[in-house]
Amino acid sequence: MKKYNIQNYIRYKNDMSSVLARLPDVEYEEYSRDQLILRFLPLVENLARKFSTSQQAIGVMTINDLIQEGFYGLCAGADRINWETINEANNKEKTLKSFLSKRIKGAIRRGIDSNRGSMRIPEHKLNEIRKDFGEDKKAVELFFNSVFTSLDDGTPEQQNAAYNIPDVKSYNKVLLAAYLKGLMLQYLNPKEFQVLRLSYGLDCEKHSAKEIAEILGIKGTSSYVRISQLKKLAIDKLIEKVPHSQVIDYL
């Protein structure tokens, strides 16, 4: 468990107050990149503070650690701002803050997961998801296909061989499984839910198609084929039904 250091946090707060007081009073687009990042550091702190009291972060990362991870997300977000879109919005500040918040929260979640986790998703697949962020269904499809491929395989070496990509990103399997089950309960029928839960071992050992057919009472010589069909249909339904807003914050 990481220890909270109150002195470091107080020092950070004092330094931040001094820096913000020296920023010029101009429109957001007139700030330099560094000034814009400084301007939104309080947003990082606010979001980090919310995460610091969450079950997933307690005992894993301190408020200072969470702020650091959020800072990385803020920097990445600052490099991807589309000022034309921001300036066309009715509320520029709200739109900009919403855009940066998603990047900050995503970075904090990844930081928490990497400190707890054992789940691995190829980094290039995550980059594809981020790249296609604006294409709602494409982002959702990439998310679910990447996650279920990783769960189905389970060995980074095999994943890398399949994708010819050496680098991977760590995610916490327990947290991700709980997250997926929540979506599955919301959008799938009971049989589809059980097929995915048992196939990928979300809260149990992984089961073969034959074993799942027996559990669900699906009989016949081609029962395992029916399970494979249900598995594909369930994933396709998630891709179709789940809005991208429910998956993008996890990345």
Image (cartoon, grey):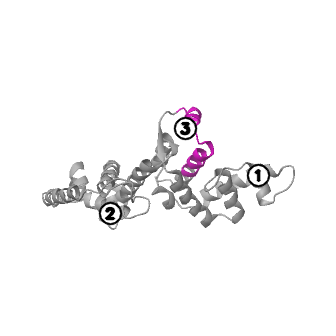
Q: Kindly report which numbered mark, 3 or 1, lies closer to the viewer in this rendering.
A: 1
- Horizontal arrangement in the rendering, residue 10 relative to residue 196 (left or right): left
Q: Which numbered disc, 1 or 2, marks the residue closer to the eye?
A: 1
- Please identify the residue farthest to the right as the structure is shown: 220
Which amino acid type is shown beneath numbered disc 3?
Pro
The amino acid type, in three-letter code, at marker 2 is: Arg
Q: How many marks?
A: 3
Query: The magenta stretch spans which residues?
Result: 142-164
Judging by the rendered image, the residue that carries numbered circle 2 is 49
Residue behind mark 1: 211
Which residue is at 20% across, 57% downward?
7
- Mark-to-mark CA distance, 1 and 2: 45 Å
Amino acid type of the residue tagged 1 in the rendering: Glu
Q: Earlier in the sequence, mark 3 or mark 1?
A: 3
Of the numbered discs 2 and 3, the one sitting upstream in the chain is 2
Q: Position of residue 16 (x, y in %)?
A: 18, 57
Residue at left offset 59%, top offset 60% = 181
Mark found first going from the N terminus, 1 or 2: 2
Q: Nearer the viewer, residue 124 or 86?
A: 124
- What residue does disc 3 label? 156
Visible in this render: residue 40? no
Q: Is residue 115 magenta?
A: no
Structural distance between the alpha carbons of marks 3 and 1: 26 Å
Q: Residue 217 at what x, y percent from top left?
A: 81, 60
Q: Secondary structure at mark 2?
A: helix
